[in-house]
Image (cartoon, grey):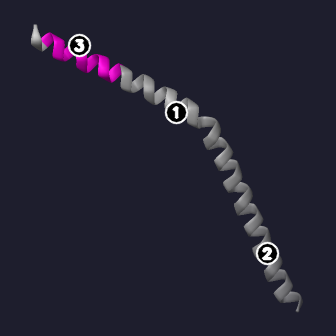
Amino acid sequence: MGCAMKKYLTSAIQLVFTLALLRVALAMFNCLLPELIIIGGIISAILLVRAYRKSKKDWW
């Protein structure tokens, strides 16, 4: 009985730990998401401007 209880307790602790880890990862992702969108937007804007200038140079 004691062995089965210990095994159950260990799996329960692992489950709680995994859930806590997922929760932290989700919170970090939610915090980083706006920054990632901003950074991605800036990078894509720079690339678009560079591509636009290059195409304009080819046109004129």
N-terminal of the two: label 2 or label 3?
2
Picture quadrant of residue 52: top left
**Mark 3 to mark 1: distance in Å?**
26 Å
- Residue 38 sits above or below residue 10 on the image: above
Q: Residue at x 30, y 22 (%)?
A: 48
Could you tell me which secondary element the residue under label 1 belongs to?
helix
Q: Disc 2 marks which amino acid?
A: Thr
Tell me the CA gap for discs 2 and 1.
37 Å
Q: Which portion, as a residue range, is magenta?
A: 46-57
* Residue at figure coordinates x 68%, y 44% from the top left: 27
Q: Which residue is mark 2?
A: 10
Mark 1 burial class by Cα count in 10 Å: few <14, some 14-19, many 20+:
few
Query: CA separation, marks 2 and 3?
Result: 61 Å
Q: Which residue is mark 1?
A: 36
Judging from the image, what secondary structure is the residue with disc 2 in?
A: helix
Horizontal side of residue 54 vs 33, given as left or right? left
Viewer-side label of 2, 3:
3
Q: Position of residue 26 (x, y in %)?
A: 65, 48
| Residue lying furthest right | 2
